Image: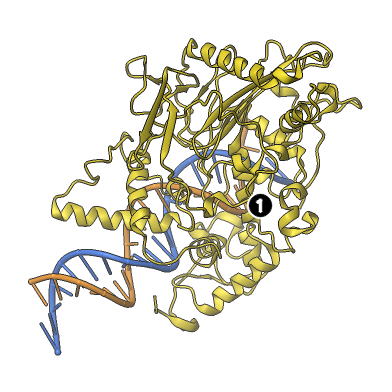
Chain colours: A yellow, B blue, C orange
DNA sequence: AAAAAAAGCAACCGCCGGATG
DNA sequence: ACATCCGGCGGTTGCTTTTTT
């Protein structure tokens, strides 16, 4: 908008965030009232320079240490909504509009959540678009949603509808869910599509939020039974998934702050010299087995989260809830996720028979369940068959499991899951993630890696990992996981 | 062409929750 | 345990621009 170009605006002034009592009064050493109103190009440039120099975050300190006479909030908003380099300008495309409708039907007025599904778009843009649309359609007496989009949220302020979906196989079927249906279903592939985590076939990393593939055509090889809480029964129709942990493109997920500056490599669980209790690196494990035709000893592997291969990185904004014990369930609408069942028993007795399983659900909504044992005498040439058999067995057992209703805490990542994410993040040096992008991670702030980009990838990775541990058999309970890494600033 | 209405947009406000001391 | 800081989010306001009458 061409208003107030170049600094001559009559913007009003305000005190800090409209809360005079905070910070012990005005300005904290900069005893001037803060400016309000439209931003000028001069202010924009100052803000851009500051962010380039210091990175995102710490908006109030940014304000204090710059010539900007704006409150921190205002700076953050300006950056996120207008100055961020990843922003997509211009009108929404028809595809985006369609997606907004679908997302709103699913989430209600959860603008940040919706924005996380619209690369380059901000919550504010979406909110404005929607509000305008609402007014227009109300005036015309039209319904808010097209006939083919079914509203699934309770009301505009409600939590989204949740379906709890057990992983499992029903009879083989091929189902195509048209992209217009804002629901997806996780299928299981059984044989030819077994997904051993590839390495060489990994596509180069692409930020999911910047990809346009967030709405694939979902071709399912198997339909999954869905548990309908209303009827307490399973159904294969109208699957619905919900993102329970929004990851706004320009924001950080809850609890992220504790990681954002962490470049410390924390030891994995029980970092004993022989790594006997480390969680195995699933990918390396499989690759080792495939390449050497023998099953490696679990103790030779160390849990290396970077092995979550890039092709499996889900779209941002996804998360999954698992209920452990004898059963687990996906409760998510994410189009991609990865489930790991940690070896059982995850204990120091690595010499004894262990098994582990992995369920991968990739961006094409293809799921593969893989299980393996590390019995040292496992016939190598029967490896895949064995995996598949066990996967089948896993699927079958899952079908028998009772769904667990997640009640009030739908929006929060389960504590266990969060701890796992915490652990995983703490075990992986940032350099692994960004080596190809930025070189020296220790210099990430000044080498062009913004906090946002770091957050972004972190969010993806957090969302991509869901793990379970059977506490009954695993001496390493979540409580033994490393504490939140110390923030390094 | 002018006025009114609608649309578009930017920014602020208040609330909230997590982090921190 | 508490207070404070900080930042995210959703609601709202108000200004400008565009379209309609």
Residue drawn at (55%, 60%) of the image: A76
SS for callout 1: helix
Is A147 positioned to the left or the right of A354 in the image?
Answer: left
Residue drawn at (32%, 47%) of the image: A101
Q: Residue furthest right?
A: A273
Residue A228, how many percent across, how many down? Answer: 36, 20
Would you place residue A170 above or below residue A285 in this image? above
Q: Which residue is mark 1?
A: A454
For this rendering, which residue is in front, B13 or A291?
A: A291
Is A84 positioned to the left or the right of A222 in the image?
Answer: right
Residue drawn at (46%, 16%) of the image: A403
Residue drawn at (80%, 55%) of the image: A442
- Residue A343 seen anywhere in this rendered image of the structure: no
Is A325 positioned to the left or the right of A82 in the image?
Answer: right
Q: Quadrant of residue A301?
A: top right
Instruction: Kindly identify which chain the residue marked by label 1 belongs to.
Output: A
Q: Quadrant of residue A425?
A: top right
Residue A253, how many percent across, how many down? Answer: 57, 44
Is A442 positioned to the left or the right of A48 in the image?
Answer: right
């Amino acid at each position: 908008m061409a208003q107030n170009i170049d600094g001559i605006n009559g913007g009003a002034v305000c005190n800090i965030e409209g809360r005079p009592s905070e910070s012990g009064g005005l300005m904290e050493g900069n005893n001037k009232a803060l400016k309000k109103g439209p931003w000028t190009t001069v202010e924009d440039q100052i803000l851009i320079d500051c962010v380039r120099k210091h990175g995102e975050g710490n908006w109030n300190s940014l304000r204090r240490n710059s010539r900007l006479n704006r409150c921190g909030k205002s700076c953050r908003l300006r950056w996120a909504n207008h100055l961020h380099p990843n922003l997509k300008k211009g009108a929404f495309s028809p595809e985006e509009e369609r997606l907004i409708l679908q997302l709103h039907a699913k989430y209600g007025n959860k603008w940040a959540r919706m924005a996380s599904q619209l690369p380059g778009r901000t919550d504010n843009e979406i909110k404005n678009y929607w509000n305008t649309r609402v007014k227009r359609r109300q005036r015309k007496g039209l319904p808010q949603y097209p006939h083919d989009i079914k509203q699934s949220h309770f009301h505009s302020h409600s939590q989204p509808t949740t379906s709890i979906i057990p992983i499992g196989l029903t009879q083989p079927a091929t189902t195509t869910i048209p992209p217009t249906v804002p629901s997806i279903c996780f299928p299981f592939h059984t044989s030819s599509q077994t997904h051993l985590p590839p390495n060489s076939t990994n596509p180069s990393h692409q930020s999911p939020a910047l990809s346009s593939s967030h709405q694939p055509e979902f071709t399912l090889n198997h339909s999954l039974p869905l548990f309908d809480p209303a009827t307490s029964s399973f159904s294969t129709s109208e699957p619905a998934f919900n993102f329970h942990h929004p990851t706004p493109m320009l924001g950080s997920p809850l609890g992220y702050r504790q990681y954002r500056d962490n470049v410390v490599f924390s030891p994995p669980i029980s970092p004993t010299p022989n790594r006997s209790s480390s969680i195995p690196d699933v990918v390396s494990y499989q690759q080792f087995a495939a390449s050497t035709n023998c099953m490696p000893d679990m103790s030779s592997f160390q849990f290396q989260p970077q092995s979550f291969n890039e092709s499996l990185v889900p779209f941002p904004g996804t998360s999954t809830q698992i209920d452990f014990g004898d059963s687990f369930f996906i409760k998510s609408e994410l189009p991609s996720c990865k489930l790991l069942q940690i070896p059982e028993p995850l204990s120091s007795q690595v010499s004894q028979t262990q098994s582990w399983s992995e369920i991968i659900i990739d961006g094409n909504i293809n799921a593969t369940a893989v299980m393996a044992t590390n019995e040292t005498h496992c016939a190598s040439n029967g490896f895949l068959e064995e995996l598949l058999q066990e996967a089948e067995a896993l699927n079958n057992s899952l079908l028998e499991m009772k769904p667990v209703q997640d009640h009030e805490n739908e929006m929060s990542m389960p504590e266990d899951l969060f701890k796992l994410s915490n652990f995983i993040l703490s075990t992986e040096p940032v350099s692994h993630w960004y080596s190809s992008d930025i070189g020296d991670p220790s210099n990430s702030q000044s080498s062009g890696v913004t906090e946002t980009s770091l957050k972004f990838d972190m969010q993806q990775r957090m969302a991509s990992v869901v793990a379970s541990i059977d506490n009954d058999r695993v001496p390493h309970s979540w409580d033994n996981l490393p504490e939140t890494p110390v923030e390094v600033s």
